Image (cartoon, rainbow, N blue to C red):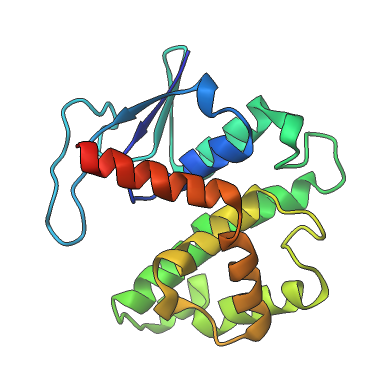
Amino acid sequence: MLTLFHSPQSRSSRIVTLLRELDAIDKVAIEIVDITRVDGSGRKDPQNPHPEGKVPLLVHDGVVIWESIAIIQYLTDLFPEKKMAPVAGDPQRGQYLSWLAWYAGVVEPVLVMQAADVSHPFVGFTFRGPAELAARLETVLTDSPYLMGERYTAVDLLLHSPFAWNPAATPDSDVVRAWIKRCEERSALQWTADYDAQTTTVA
């Protein structure tokens, strides 16, 4: 039994998109919960088992998996048929795991600091900055359409997502913008947008 705790138009939307890409949307029960949002709306939903009231949260046969990176890795391993991630033993597996870790350890901190207008030598030394983040993406995407090469994978879904949510944070790079556009054209992403809109209306 798989259950995803999801709040429409939030970080958990990308997990719904991943499930659609994995052709596993019908294998997971989606529980809609409320969350506290940046603008102060919403609330900590008592129906959400996440200890901090956040989403996404995945429960598989009673085992709780939290944090987007862990959930993405877990689901792509559980449903490998669509090849959204290299399987264990694949030569590209290490690169895939590195991109996931880079998102959590660098991309989100850098973008949050940028949005909060926080600047400090310790921050730049530890996480790098927007310029270094942009250069890393541009270097890779100059030679290939996706981060892992010719094939769209879960790391593209994940890493393009903050720029889709906040276009103002998008690096000033034609190749990066073209990559984001390719990711946004995925039918699974549109499916999730429609699903979230309908769910919000119903709620």
Between 23 and 11, the one nearer to me in the picture: 23
Relative to 57, 102 lies left or right: right
- Identify which residue, 59 or 121, lies in the foreground: 59
Q: Is residue 171 above or below residue 24?
A: below
Q: Name the residue: 32% across, 47% down.
A: 197
Work out whether residue 124 can be spotted: yes
Question: Residue at image x 47%, y 39%?
Answer: 16
Number of on-image labels: 0
User: Residue 138 appears in which quarter of the rendering?
Assistant: bottom right
Residue 88 percent location from the top left of the image = 78, 34
Image coordinates of residue 40 in percent, x first then y, are: 12, 57
Percent x, y for residue 75? 59, 32
Q: Does the rendering let one see residue 12?
A: no
**Residue 45, placed above or below residue 93:** above
Q: Quadrant of residue 81?
A: top right
Q: Is residue 48 found left or right of 185 in the rendered image?
A: left
Q: Position of residue 99 (x, y in %)?
A: 65, 56
Q: Nearer the viewer, residue 157 or 96?
A: 157
User: Is residue 83 left or right of 25 when viewed as pictured?
Assistant: right
In the rendered image, the quadrant that contains the C terminus is: top left
Residue 79, relative to residue 113: is it above or below? above
- Most distant residue in the right direction: 91
Residue 53 vs residue 183: left or right?
left
Residue drawn at 69 percent across, 50 percent down: 153
Quadrant position of residue 43: top left
- Residue at the image position 61 percent from the left and 85 percent from the top: 173
